[in-house]
Image (tube, rainbow, N blue to C red):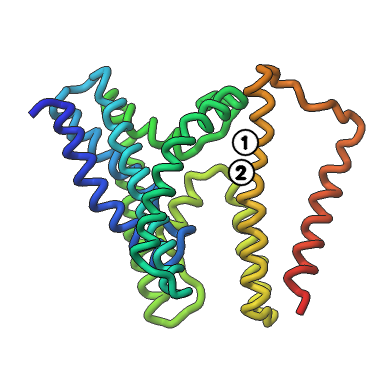
Amino acid sequence: MGIAALLAVLMMIFGFLFSAVAAYMAGVVGSSNNPISGVTIATILFSSLLLLVLLGAGSEVGAAGAIMVGAVVCCAAAIGGDNLQDLKTGHIVGATPWKQQIMQVVGTISAAVVLGLVLDILHTAYTIGSPTLSAPQATLMKSVADGVFTGNLPWAFVYMGALIAVIIILIDIRQEKRGSDFRVPVLAVAVGIYLPITLTVPIFIGGMINHLGKKAGASKTAEKKGLLLASGLITGEALMGIFVAVPIFLTGNKNWWPNFSGFEFLGPLAFIAVIYWIYKSVSKK
């Protein structure tokens, strides 16, 4: 069997298994708990080890092949989670399943058609892969693939991480049996370890605010409103990143944005205003 055929088989096997896992997690818990990063990293590690045996250490195409397999599996897991989340929502509101499935296909094809242009726009504006563009997950995946073939992957840390994961899972099982509200899901802990502190601190603060709000007797309606507003802000931030990149893509000028020197204080004020608006909107009966 050629290398190309082997990679295709790996893609199908890992794609089938991990898309099922991701879809199940998204359907049961929610799309925010879709373990895409975990399954992608696991795929890259297994693929790298297999290709290492077949191609040998120092292979120039081994790491790239493992990343390719991981990319396909990542897409499969993401689409699987999205489909199950949509079908679950459709079941709740009484949608017709076969019509949903048709629109799922239309949505997937539409995304595939426009994705290349969107990536080109983002690369022109922000240079995907540049040192100034933080990409902790991509860096981790690249380190795993390169580390296997160059022989400098710190296996001691991999074994230590696996041991810590087992301990965390046992603790979480114990907490579940005790009926405790405080849980330690291993995936959330793992993501918190490798993400930069600039991301984990806001996530932790948001989680604590949500926890304190529940302790203070916040209603389910308020929680749902807060979740919808937060989701809208996240989506809006991603869309604005694309909208800001469009003029750069069209003009080739990365400094097209007007200079507002001396008005830097407007940023913190706007941030505080948004926080106050969210509080008032959520707390309003």
Could you say where residue 45 lies in the image, as x and y percent from the top left?
A: 28, 39
Q: Residue at x 51, y 29 (%)?
A: 117
Q: Mark 1 and mark 2: span between their CA atoms?
A: 7 Å
Helix, strand or loop status at disc 1: helix
- The residue type indicated by label 2 comes to Ala
Q: Residues within 10 Å of mark 2 (few under 14, many from 20)?
A: few
Q: Residue at x 31, y 25 (%)?
A: 64
- Quadrant of the frame with the C terminus: bottom right
Q: Is residue 70 left or right of residue 285?
A: left
Q: Residue at x 36, y 72 (%)?
A: 173
Q: Are marks 1 and 2 in contact (CB under 8 Å)?
A: yes
The residue that mark 1 highlights is 242
- Taking depth in this image into account, of 106 and 162 the one nearest to the observer is 106
Q: Residue at x 38, y 36 (%)?
A: 141
Could you say where residue 7 lies in the image, as x and y percent from the top left?
A: 20, 33
Helix, strand or loop status at disc 2: helix
Residue 48 image-quadrant placement = top left
Whether residue 265 is situated above or below residue 79 in the rendered picture: above
Please tell me the numbered disc located at residue 139: none
- Taking depth in this image into account, of 276 and 167 the one nearest to the observer is 276
Residue 28 visible: no
Q: Is residue 97 left or right of residue 259?
A: left
- Taking depth in this image into account, of 161 and 13 the one nearest to the observer is 13
- Taking depth in this image into account, of 243 and 203 the one nearest to the observer is 243
- The residue type indicated by label 1 comes to Ile
The residue that mark 2 highlights is 238
Residue 11 image-quadrant placement = top left
Residue 282 visible: yes
Could you say where residue 159 lies in the image, as x and y percent from the top left?
A: 30, 46
